[in-house]
Amino acid sequence: APTTAPTTLPTLGAPISAPPVETPAPVAPVPETLAPVAPTPAPVTVTPAPVAATPAPVAPTPAPVAPTAAPVSPTPAPVAPTPQPTNVPTSQPTPEPTNPPTLPPTNAGPPTVLQAIQPLALQGGNEFNDPNSYQSCALARTEEQEGINTRSTAKIAQYYALYSIFCATNGVTNIITESEGILNVPGWIVAAGWESNSLDPCSGSWFGVDCDGDLVTKLDLFSNLLTGAFPPEVMLLASDGPRSTGAGALQRIDLFDNMLLTNNGDNSWWSDLGSSFGFLFFKETAFSGALSRLPPNIREFDCSFSFISGGLTQQNFQGLNSLIFANFDGNAYNSTVPSAFSSMPNLQFLYIVDGFISGDLSYMVGMSSLREHWADSNPGLGGQMPAGISSIPTLESFSITSCSFSGTIPTEFGNFGFVMKQMWMYDNDLTGTIPSELANMAALRLLQVEGNSFTGSMPPEICANTVFPRPLEELGADCFDPGFSCECCTCCSVQECPI
């Protein structure tokens, strides 16, 4: 499987094989892909965190850049009224200033690291009371940076946020390492720049960190043996929102293939990653808990094959108009698919293989840009296939194997015309005859309907599409069933047909 999800949309091509009965999900959309035996990963553009989400303060108090109105040296109290007072005196000159300095006389300068960070700390600074916390480690690493006391609060916050990630995930134990009996927890495979005291995070020398000018925009830490729990301090790199510090304009986090990395069951932090954030990938990690509301402009999201349980709700996905790619494979949502997906104007790739989803396909009706949808191996998903699916003008690849669909194949599926290229419907409870209208799918290269209870025979119009130069290369049905015949099929059972 590729290490990252695609940044650009794939182009579908001729399928090689169909998806298995109980397959892992696509890691990323692969146009003209094999059957969804192992769906390819996602984005370029896969979403770990704290033991418990810490509520954000109403308004973090910024550290003062300089003491207000502090004199260079305190004014001595006059023994007698001065002949020409600097301020208009009262009837009796006061022996001491009426407004004493608010701070001891000092030479004003930049805030110390602790002064800069404490107002931004997610626990109000209480996290620094534990010298063994990852936050104390991050504070210490920030203080060790050359010239740090001359840097802006935003730059100090940038160091602190990044070192929170490093200290929380580099060779740190968690419930996964303990359950696996891993005594010597490995550190990051690559940590270039992160262990230096003299390199700016935006110098181009920090592994996995990309910047736009002086703002962190991307964290690509996939396949790097991160352990521990991914920290919520990453919110300090958001472009805007309640935790933004001016340290970043974060667009992407890619944590794919860090199988020992947890989030302590809390995903609430990603709701505050800002309006610039578009890509979140944590496929094949140990992230758990329910999905949280995604950032408003998310474009690609891959949480497949983690330990997510729940959160596939209307509230969490309503109004995500920028979402293009979503991979939910291999988790346990125990819910229906919300209708919010039907109104996403840009959604092109949707994968929910082996996701413990139920209900029917009504969430597909109304989709306007969908190109590929695989929902295999969900026994709770069934009912009759809605004819309205055929109104999706862009659908090229459709797979619903090993589910519980019943009734007949809608004749309206012939309306897919020159768009549909591959269709897997095997291992369901479909009945009736196979409609000859399916022959109108003139670009169809693969059709597998074996493992159902069809009667009659394969329509000759469909068989005609198997003759060169017509494109239908793979045609699977129950040729050996006493009540059904197919003289042009390339395979005749679930066991025989390629997966």
Image: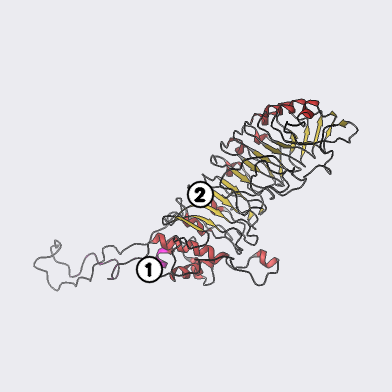
Residue type (three-letter) at the residue carrying disc 2? Phe
- Furthest toward the left, the residue is 83
Q: Quadrant of the C terminus?
A: top right
In front here: 314 or 187? Answer: 187
In front here: 449 or 471? Answer: 471
Look at the image and tell me whether residue 123 can be seen. Answer: no
Which residue shows up at 76% across the image and 43% down it?
Answer: 379
Name the main secondary structure of what is drawn in magenta.
Answer: loop
Q: x, y (%) of residue 215?
A: 43, 55
Total residue callouts: 2
Q: Which residues are magenta?
A: 95-116
Residue type (three-letter) at the residue carrying disc 1? Asn
Q: x, y (%) of residue 381?
A: 73, 40
Which residue shows up at 49% across the image and 60% down it?
Answer: 122
Dot 2, crowdedness within 10 Å: few (<14), some or many (≥20)?
many
Could you say whether the residue bearing mark 1 is in a helix, strand or loop?
Answer: helix
In front here: 333 or 320? Answer: 320
Quadrant of the rendered image containing residue 34 = top right
- Which residue bears the numbered disc 1? 149
Look at the image and tell me whether residue 479 can be seen. Answer: yes
Please tell me whether residue 107 belongs to the stretch shown in magenta: yes
The relative height of residue 73 versus residue 245 in the rendered view (above or below) is below
Could you say whether the residue bearing mark 2 is in a helix, strand or loop?
Answer: loop
Q: Which of the two labelled residues, at mark 1 and mark 2, occupies the earlier sequence position?
A: 1
Q: Give the CA separation, mark 1 to mark 2.
A: 30 Å
Q: x, y (%) of residue 196?
A: 48, 69
Q: x, y (%) of residue 147?
A: 38, 69
- Which residue bears the numbered disc 2? 277
In front here: 290 or 436? Answer: 436
Please tell me whether residue 369 belongs to the stretch shown in magenta: no
The reply, left or right, for residue 276 in relation to residue 475 is left
